[in-house]
């Protein structure tokens, strides 16, 4: 009696073969993706998720700092999202010290390793931003 292959296992096998066929995946970098994505202007951030539609709510800068804290709480696992959040927080008016304090405070809740990893990622972005000025 022949056993019918598990459809999920077959799909995963095919996806793995397909991923191996894309040589460009070896060269993928988060910085390259970040350069491709660019940044959203502050006025657009305020319109989409800031004070424009909700005058008594959180402004875009505060929302981006909260996003940074949330990504830090997750252990800074999503480097690309954290890098973009730092870029957008700066664009929304956050100062370097505010970004650093936001991540530093998360050491109490997320632990030192998560805070350290987030700080390393954020510092790279902040150093790049200083070079742009």
Image: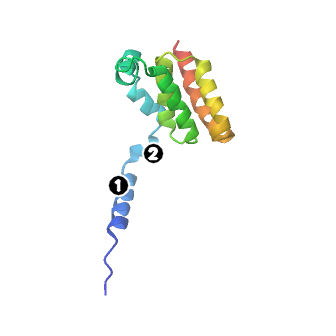
Residue under the image location 65 percent in, 30 percent down: 104
- In the current view of this chain or complex, which residue is farthest to the front? 56
Residue under the image location 39 percent in, 28 percent down: 37
- In the current view of this chain or complex, which residue is farthest to the bottom? 1
In terms of secondary structure, where does tag 1 sit?
helix
Q: Tell me where residue 22 appears, x and y as whole percent.
A: 37, 48
Q: Dot 2 corresponds to which residue?
A: 26
- In the current view of this chain or complex, which residue is farthest to the top? 133
Say which quarter of the image contains residue 27.
top left
Q: Tell me where residue 53 appears, x and y as whole percent.
A: 34, 20
In terms of secondary structure, where does tag 2 sit?
helix
Residue under the image location 47 percent in, 37 percent down: 29
Residue 75 left/right relative to 111: left
Label 1 and label 2: CA atoms lie apart by: 13 Å
Residue 87 visible here: no
Say which quarter of the image contains residue 72.
top right
Q: Tell me where residue 62 appears, x and y as whole percent.
A: 50, 22
Q: Dot 1 corresponds to which residue?
A: 18
Quarter of the image where the N terminus is located: bottom left
Q: Nearer the viewer, residue 19 or 61?
A: 61
Q: Earlier in the sequence, mark 1 or mark 2?
A: 1
Q: Tell me where residue 11 appears, x and y as whole percent.
A: 33, 62
Q: Nearer the viewer, residue 80 or 59?
A: 59
Q: Badge 1, how many Cα within 10 Å: few under 14, some, many 20+?
A: few
């Amino acid at each position: 009696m022949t056993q019918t292959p598990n459809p999920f296992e077959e799909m995963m096998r095919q996806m793995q073969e397909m991923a191996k066929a894309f040589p460009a995946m070896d060269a993928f970098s988060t910085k390259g993706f970040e350069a491709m994505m660019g940044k959203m202007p502050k006025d657009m951030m305020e319109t989409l998720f800031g004070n424009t539609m909700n005058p008594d709510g959180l402004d875009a800068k505060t929302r981006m700092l909260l996003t940074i804290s949330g990504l830090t709480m997750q252990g800074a696992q999503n480097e690309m999202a954290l890098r973009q959040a730092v870029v957008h927080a700066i664009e929304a008016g956050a100062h370097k010290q505010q970004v650093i304090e936001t991540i530093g405070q998360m050491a109490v809740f997320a632990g030192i390793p998560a805070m350290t990893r987030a700080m390393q990622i954020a510092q790279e972005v902040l150093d790049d931003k200083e070079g742009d000025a």
